[in-house]
Amino acid sequence: MAGTGMPLLDISGLSVEFRGGSRTARVLNDVALTVAANETLGIVGESGCGKSMTALAILRLVPSPPGRITGGRIVFEGEDLLQASEQRLRDVRGHRIGMIFQEPMTSLNPVLTIGDQLSETLVKHLKLDARAARGRSIELLRAVGIPAPERRVDEYPHQLSGGMRQRVMIAMAIGCEPQLLIADEPTTALDVTVQAQIFELLRELRDRRGMGLILITHDMGVIAEMTDRVAVMYGGRVVEEAATAEILSAPAHPYTRGLIACVPDLDAEEAPGADLVEIAGMVPSVWDLPRGCPFADRCAEAMPRCVAEMPPTTVMTAGHSVACWLHQGVPS
Amino acid sequence: MSAPLVSVRNLRIHFARPHFNPLKPRETVRAVDGVSFDVGRGTTLGIVGESGSGKTTVARGLLRLVPVTSGHVVLGGTDITALGAEAMRHMRRHMQYVFQDPYSSLNPRVRAGAIVRSPLDVLGIGTPAEREARVAELFAAVGLRPESQHLFPHQFSGGQRQRINIARALAPAPDLLVCDEPVSALDVAIRAQILNLLQQLKRRLGITYLFISHDMAVVKHVADEVAVMYLGQIVERAPRMAFFARPLHPYSVALMSAVPTVRGGRERAANRIRLTGDPPSPINPPPGCRFAARCPAAEPACRQSMPELRELVPGQWVRCHRVEVVGEAIRRPLG
């Protein structure tokens, strides 16, 4: 954590709603997160739990309509982005805050060369001329480990493999040396050996430039390897947050415990054919969230109170908070 | 191992690239280039490898869903590469396929019950009444509610759709189930449900699986034997315990070290074997070992001649010049 006292990004009370006809979906509910410089925050959870929506909301990219940010503050470097003008936001997006989207196959423009797409942000934000932007693009491609960048810069996305396209996306996101990088499942579509290269690059960028990093993933192994702190999301809420080592060794929320246990583990010394721990059922629809804890119907430890009432977020120990009735009344 | 259910010998599947210049020789993609393995009855062979390694093409070749260039696939004593179209159609009763994507592999306009019944209709198995009874039995076996037979695919979640896929594959009571990345399109928590279902079916019905996956941990969980593919070839084949305790081929070692684990954390990342570059093109693969250009342990000899797949100790095969047997011990170049 940085010693300045003020986090790089401070989100509090963030709520997002989607309207469809007469119905309202509460996609994010009172989300609070912080990221310091040189820190990596992991966000885990299943699809539909609000991970990607949180990332989009930070850059105010929630599709509107039907979506709407209904409340909260997103303070980045002391400025509330929810109050900022569109013009100011254009300067923040891709410049101060970089974003790596999930789909490397569809996030690049097929009719522009790699160089054109990389240069665009450099010309816009760093006011480079075309020649300097091209030179910088080649440098960036080299930095993300693309062989023969002088040749690749003039190629089109379809000439590159999936791994290389994702590396181009990363080059684009870090082109203006952002203070904060949001990476939404940056390696999901990639092979593990390429994933290892990309994580090494992200670690190096964070350590060298003191960049803050938000890493969205569903892989607990990635969390263990890359992050300092973790927020577990479920049903549009942060249900548990703690330092990575703490959450992996002493997960408090039943959902967090399930997420860690349900994945086959390469290190496990299990007997062949043993069953995995299952989390029964599935994620509730955002259009139909229950009144109480959203995890109650899948939770083996649910009590009557869980169905009736949403548990508040309580601090268990310093830096470890959880929203679960099982942990109410635990002295802090 | 008792007599194997499936024997694959020297399987080659090559594709001619479309060409536009009549003066240039036609290029050939060697997607699968000399693959041999056996799968024992009631066991699971897991094939791991990265994209482009040819693992899906092997699976498709086994069912002759792609034309086989050369080699033999023997299922229960019958060489299916020699069968005519009609005989092959009936052979498919014994071998079925579970596809990766539960969304695109179900016809959106057909009800779930009819989807599961379709192999019985196509292959002419049983009377209509028997087929209905079989469908009901299959729905129960894969954990779907009987009344959901009347629903359409879009009314199911991803995990439930994969259950429909599995039920359809099980309908003609096959001996062999080829599962091509059956859980990679599913959410983490749902994966455990489907993996457990596949294991239960194996215990109950004695099904033999060919299980294709890029996920080492999943393969470790389900497989009895493991084969690692790289650029159209098997580079290592071994029983599960031996393989995961000590992989021999440098590629297997690197692949395993690339997987992030909860217990390994940062230390694992720091000690990782770094692979650079991308696999070479399967159009004109280099003459020597196909992994040589990226292998941290490669020597000049590795680039000259292709290593053979050797059986070092019974059941453990490796395709590497640098793995040696010294007395009782196996010396591996990496790890």
Image: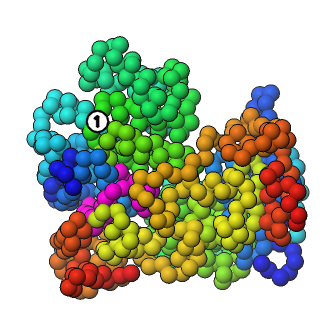
Going 83% across and 41% down the picture, which residue do you hit?
A305
Coloring applied to the structure: rainbow
Asked if residue A248 is positioned above or below residue B44 in the image, the reply reads below
Quadrant in which residue A116 is drawn? bottom right
Q: Residues within 10 Å of mark 1 (few under 14, many from 20)?
A: some
Residue at 50 percent of width and 73 percent of height: A197
Q: Position of residue A101 (x, y in %)?
A: 61, 58
* Quarter of the image where the C terminus of chain B is located: bottom left
Coordinates of residue A68 in the picture (x, y in percent): 81, 44
Secondary structure at numbered mark 1: loop
Which image quadrant for residue A280? top right
Q: Nearer the viewer, residue A295 or A106?
A: A295
Instruction: Say if residue A42 shows up in the picture.
Output: yes
Q: Which residues are magenta?
A: B210-237
Residue beneath label 1, please?
B174
Q: Quadrant of residue B32?
A: bottom left
Task: Left or right? Give the position of B299 relative to A147.
Answer: left
**Which quarter of the rendered picture does the N terminus of chain B lie within?**
bottom left
